[in-house]
Amino acid sequence: WAEPTRLLSSLPLALATEVALRRWALDDPGAGLLVEHLALVAPVATWRLIRELADADPEQDPELKATAEKFLGAVPAPFLEPVTLMLLGSTQLMVGDRLIDSPELLKRKRVRQLLALLGVERSVDRSRIFGLLWPESPEAGAAANLRTNLKHLLAAIEPDRRSGEAAFLVRSVGPRLELAGPAYVTTDIELAEQAIDEAESLLEAGAPTEAMHRFETAVDLWRGRPLDELADLADFASVTEHLTARLVGAAVRAAEIRLARSETERAGELAAKALKADPWAEGAHRISIDAAWERGDHSLARHLAEDCSKMLADLAVEPAPETAMTLRRVSRSTSDSQF
C-alpha cells in the first residue's frame, strides 16, 4: 500500500479517490490515510468525486456506488471555514465571517439551547440532554424531540450536507453527541478566558499596556448575559456567574489602566459595561466617578457618587479605601461649591 503522497502524485485525483474507496471497503487502514490526505489536498474536488460515484448509475459499478454511499454516511466531509460559536450573550454562530441567520437556528429555542450545551460541554450524553431540555417528557418523547431539534440544528449549520451524509460539526458517537474539536469550532468563551488568562500573566510580568489590550479582547467578545440560552437551567447558573465575574473583572482592570493613561472616555465605557452586568461592582463605580471627574463632568461625577453611596448602603458595607477617597473628593467639592 503506497504512501498517500506518492500514490496521489502518480495517479489522477479521480483514480486515487476510487482506489481509496475500494480499499476502504476492505477495511484497509491505509485507505483512511489516503482519504485524509485527499481531504487536505483537494477537499472540495474529492467529495465532489465521491458524491458523483454515489449518484452514478448502479448498473455501471454497483459495488463502487454502494461503497461511496456508505463512505459518505460514515465519514463527514471536511469543513473548510473556521466556525465560532458565540455564547457570551444570545447564541450565535459564525462560519468564516458570515453570521448564520437560518430560521432553524433563530426561531427555535431548543435548537439554540442544544447548540449552546454542546458549545459548553463539547461532548454530552443523550440522557443528560433529555434531562436538561425535556425533563418532563418520557424517554421516548425526549428522544424524538432531540432527533427533531438535531435535524433542525444540522440544517442550520451544515446546509450543504446531503441527506444520509455524516455530519461534521455535530457528531453522534455512541450514546453521546459531540461538537467538532477546537481546531474546527472555537467558542467565544474559550477565546475570552484565554485572553483574560494571558492578560493576568502580562500584568504579573509588568506589561500593563499589553495586558489592557488582552482584557479588552475578552470584553469586546461580551455581548450580554453569558450562556443566555442556558442561564435559567440550574446546572448552568454557577457557570454563568463565573463567566460574568471574570468578564466584569476584566472590564474593571482594563478601565483602571485606561484611567491611569488619562483615557477617561474609554475607561468610562468599560466601567459602564461592567456595571450593566453587575450593579454592585464597587471598582466599576469608582472608575466611573473618577473618569467623569477627570474629564471635567463634575455634575455627572456627583450623580455617580450618589449611586455608589446608595449601593454601598444597600449592601451595608464600608467602601474600599480607594472608593472612600473618591467619594470624599467629590463630597468636598460639593460642599465647597455651596459657598
Image (cartoon, rainbow, N blue to C red):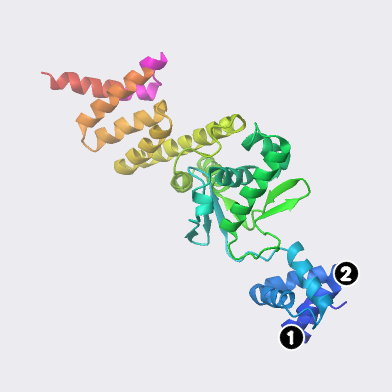
> Where's residue 63, x and y in %?
84, 76
Residue nearest the viewer, comparing 314 with 233: 233
Q: Residue furthest left?
A: 339
Q: Mark 1 — residue?
A: 12
- Split into 4 quadrants, where in the image is the C terminus? top left
Tally of numbered discs: 2
Q: Mark 2 — residue?
A: 28
> Where's residue 249, x and y in %?
47, 35
Q: Is residue 317 visible?
A: no
- The residue located at (80%, 68%) in the rendering is 32
* Residue stretch in magenta: 313-326
> Where's residue 59, x and y in %?
80, 82
Q: Is residue 8 visible?
A: yes
Relative placement, left or right, of 109 versus 52 is left
Q: Nearer the N terminus, badge 1 or badge 2?
A: 1
Q: How many residues crowd around disc 2 within 10 Å: few (fewer than 14), some, or many (20 or more)? A: some
- The residue located at (74%, 86%) in the rendering is 12
Are discs 1 and 2 less than 8 Å apart at CB? no
Helix, strand or loop status at disc 2: loop
Quadrant in the rendering for residue 21: bottom right
Amino acid residing under circle 2? Asp
Residue nearest the viewer, comparing 141 with 321: 141
- Split into 4 quadrants, where in the image is the N terminus? bottom right
Q: Which mark is residue 79?
A: none
| C-alpha gap between disc 1 and disc 2 | 21 Å
